[in-house]
Image (tube, rainbow, N blue to C red):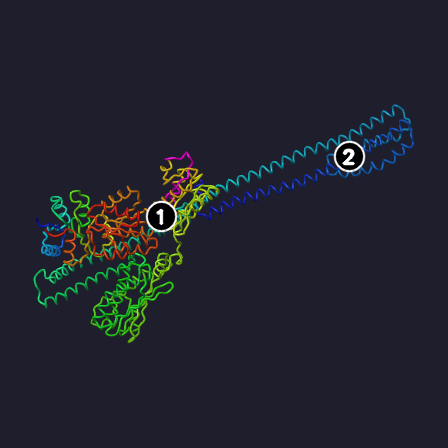
Amino acid sequence: MTQKRILLAEDEAHIAKLVEFKLGKEGYAVELASNGGVAIEKLRTEPQGFALLILDVMMPVADGWEVLRFVRTESAVKGLPVLMLTAKGHQKDMANAAELGATQFLKKPFDPTELARLVRKLVGDPK
Amino acid sequence: MSWLRFSKRPLGVQFWIAGGIVGFFSVASLFLLLSQVRRQTEASRWLAQTHRTISRLSTLGRDFYQHRTLLRGHLESAEPRKLEQAKDRRPQWDRTFESLRESVEAYPDARPHLEAAGRAYEAWQRHAFAAPGGASERALETEARLFQEAWASIEALIDRFNRQLSVRDLDEKSAIQHTFAAIALINITLLLAFGVALINLYQSIARPIAGLSVGIRRYMSGDFRARVAVGRTPEIGYVGSSFNELAARIESMVSDLRRLDEMKSDFLSTVSHELRTPLTSIGGYVKLLLSGDAGALSSTQTEFLNIVDTNVGRLGHLINDLLDVEKIESGKIQLIREPQDLSEILRECRDSMAILAKQKGLEFRFTVPEQPVFAMGDRVRLIQVFMNLLSNAIKYTRKGYVELSLERRDFAVMIRVRDSGEGLSPEDQEQLFQKFYRSRRALESAESGTGLGLVIVKGLVEAHGGTVAVESGLGEGTVFTVSLPLEGLAEVIAANAGAEGRVIEEAGLRPRERVVWHVGGDAESGRRVRALLAAPELDEGGRRLGAESFSGASTLPRATSWEESPLLVILDGAAVNRESVAESARRAGAGTPILVLGDSEETAQVFAWGATALLKKPIKPARFSATVSDLLRMRGRRILLADPDPDVRLLLKRALEQRGYVVEDVDRGNLALARLERERYDLLILERELPDVSGVEVLRAARRLPQHALLKVLVLDDAGASSEQREFEALGVERVVATYQGIDPVVEAASRLLANGKA
C-alpha cells in the first residue's frame, strides 16, 4: 500500500515545514498548499487524493473557514476529515467551525508530538 | 389655511388667542342671561300689576251691576229701602274707583278711558238718584242707556288690559326664545372651538410627545439611529429637534467609540496572532529537537533547549494574559455559568500545584470538605483563578506552607489561599490589583511574572459576582480570600442538598408530582375520573395519581418546565374538539400524552387533532387503567441526541422516531446542556467527542441537574473502547456503543434501555 497523503494548508513556511518534518518522520506524505486558494485547487484536481486536510485558520486568498466550507459543500470531498489549527481567542469561530463540520481542533502553539498523535487517531497508520 | 398658520404660532400665543375667544363668548352669554333675567323680573311685576288692575275693574263692574240692580228695583217699583241700600253702596264704588285710579297711574294712555268710565258712571248715578220711584218709561229708558254707556266703557277698559296682557305675554315669550337661541349658539360655537382646540392640542403637543417618548424608548433600548418627527409648534418642535440633534451626536460618539473599541480588539487579536505565529514556530521546533526526532542531543543542548521552551511558554502565557485583561476591561468576558462543584475544582488545583510546592520544600495544606459544594460558575475560569493564586503563593514563599481552604457560609463560599511568606506592605496591598504592578517581594524574588495575574483573578471573580480580598502584613504571611455568592438558584440549592444526602423536597424544590389534567368535564365526570385514577394498578411507589380539573383548555396553566407539566392530559365532554387538543398540547408541554374520552361519534379524527389515545364511553375501569399506564410509559420516551455529525444525527433520529420515540437532536455540548437544564429526558445519546464541551463534561453537568440524576445514557464512540471508559462508568453510563458498526446497535441499545432499563 502507498503512503497516506495529507494536504496541509498553511501560509507560514516555518510552521509548514515543521508539520511536514514531523509527519514525514511519522511516515505520512505531506502535500503543502501555501494558501487556501491553492488548497481548494488541489482538492478540486485530486478529490480522492488525500486522507486528511490540515487547515490553518488565518491564510491569504481563502482562509481556513472558506476552505472548510468548500470541503463540506463539494460532494467529491465531503467525507474528508479536517483538522483545524486555531489560535486562542477564536472560540466563537470554533463554534462556527463545529457547525461547518470540522473534525478536530488543535490550538496553536502546539506540540508536534500531539499533532502526530491526533493525525494517527484520525487517519490511522501511515500505510 | 389660516387655521394651519394658527397652529404654527408659539404655544403661548395659541393659548392667549384661544383664551380670549372663550372669555369673550363667556362674558357675552353671561350678559345675555343677566339682561334676560332683569327683563323677566320687570315683566312679572307688570303682569302682576295688570292682573290686579283687571281684577279691580271686574270688582268695579260687579259692584256697578249690583248697584244698578238695586236702583233699578227702586225705579221700577219705588222701594225706598232699595234706594237706601243703593246709596249705601256708593262709598264702596268710590273706594274701588280710587284704587283703580292709582293702578292706572302706570298706564297713562288708559287714564282718559278710566275717567270717561267715571264720568259715565256719575252721569248714570245722577240720573238714577234724581228719578223718583216708579219712574216713567222714558226715565227708565234713559237710565238703561246711561247704564249701558258706563258699562261699555268699563268693559272696554277690561278688554284693553286683557289685550295688553296677551301682547306682552307674546313679547316675553319671543324674548326668552331669542335669548336662549343666542346662548345656545354661543355654546355651540364654544364647543366647536374646544373641539378644534383639542384636535390642535393633540396634533401639536400630544402626538409629538408620544412620538418623542417612543423615540426615546427606542434610543434607550440601544437603537441609536432612532429619531423623532419634529412637531409643528415651535416649543415642541424645538424639543423634538433638540432630541434629534442630541441623538445624532450621541450616535456619532457611540459609533466612534465602537470603532475605536473594534480597532483595539482587532489590533490586539492581530498582535496576538502575529506574536503567536513565530512563537508557534519557535516552540514547535524546540519541541521537535527535544523529542529527538532531529537527532540525538547532548545533555547541555537539552538543558538549553528546555530553557528556550520554558520561555516560549512564558511568552505564550503573557499573550493569553494580555488578551484576558483586554476582555475583562472591555467587559467582553463570557462565562459559561453552570453549577460547579468547588471542592472538586479545588482538588484538581491541588493535584497540579502540590508538586510545585513539594519541589520548593513547602508543605501543602488542604482543608476542603470531601462532599461537593456547588456554586454557579465557569469551570475553566474558576480553575484559572485558584491556580493563579496558588502559583503566586508558592512562588513567593521560601519556607513554611501554602494552604488552600474552603468555608461554606449561608449565602457565599469563601476560598482562602494562605501562605507563610514574607507578607505584603500596606502600599503593596493597595496597588496589588493594578495592571503590571509587581510587589517588592515579587521584584526581589528571582521569580518571573507579568503583573497581570491578580488583575485577571479580580476581574474573573467579579464577573462571577464575587469578591477578592487580601490580608497581609510584613512577616505575617498573606491570605487571599475569594468569596463566591451562593445565590438562591434552584439548581445550586438542589445540587448542594443532593450532595449532602438530603432529598430534593427538603431543599424547597417541588418533587415530581404525579398530576393529571382533566379538562372539559363536569363535576360528576371529574369525580369519576378521579376514582378511575385512584386504581391501585396506577400507583407508583405508594404515590397516587392526582387529577386537577379545568373547565376548558383555555383555562389551563402554561407549563414552562418539566416540573410543571402534567403526566397526562385527559380531555372530556366539552373539550373534545380540535382546538382544545391543540391548546392542551401547547400548554402541557411537548411529549405529554393526550387521552380523549369520547362519545361514539369521535373516531380516527381525534388522532388527526393530535390526541395520543381515545377511550369511548362508557368507560370500563380495567380498560382505563391499562390505557393510562401505557400512556404514562410512553411519556418515558424522550431522547436527547447530541452528535456533531449531521448524517449520524439524521439517521439515528429517523430510526428512533420510527420506533415511536420523541427525539430532539443537537450538534454541540453546550446546546445539549441547555436542553438538559430546561427539559426532562429519559435517555441521552451522547457522542464522546463534541466540538465545544466533551461528552464527559456534558454528562458531569447533567448529573448535577435534579431531574437528570438518574438519566439513562448511551455514549457513542467511534473507536469502540474509550480511555474515558472508567470515568463514564463512574458517571453511570449504561453502555458505550461503537459507531463504526452503523446505527443499528445504537437503536437496539436505546430500545432495550427504555423498555427495561438494561442496555
In the rendered image, the vertical position of residue B154 relative to residue B21, given as above or below: above
Percent coordinates x, y for residue B409 in the rendering: 37, 65
Q: Quadrant of residue A75?
A: top left
- The chain ID associated with circle 2 is B
Residue matched to label 1: B227
In the rendered image, the vertical position of residue B430 relative to residue B547, given as above or below: below
Range shown magenta: B582-604
Circle 1 SS class = loop
Which mark is on residue B57?
Answer: 2
Q: Is residue B574 left or right of residue B184?
A: left
Q: Nearer the viewer, mark 2 or mark 1?
A: 1
Circle 2 SS class = helix
Q: Earlier in the sequence, mark 2 or mark 1?
A: 2
Which quadrant: the N terminus of chain B?
top left
Judging depth in this view, the residue of A1 and B301 nearest the camera is A1
The amino acid sitting under disc 1 is Arg
The amino acid sitting under disc 2 is Leu
Q: Residues within 10 Å of mark 2 (few under 14, many from 20)?
A: many
Percent coordinates x, y for residue B503 in the rendering: 38, 58
| Spatial CA span between label 2 and label 1 | 88 Å
Judging depth in this view, the residue of A1 and B355 nearest the camera is A1
Q: Is residue B29 left or right of residue B575?
A: right
Q: Residues within 10 Å of mark 1 (few under 14, many from 20)?
A: many
Residue B590 covered by magenta stretch: yes
Q: Quadrant of residue B114?
A: top right
Among all residues in the image, which is located at the extreme bottom? B475
In the rendered image, the vertical position of residue A83 relative to residue B61, given as above or below: below
Judging depth in this view, the residue of A114 and B266 nearest the camera is A114
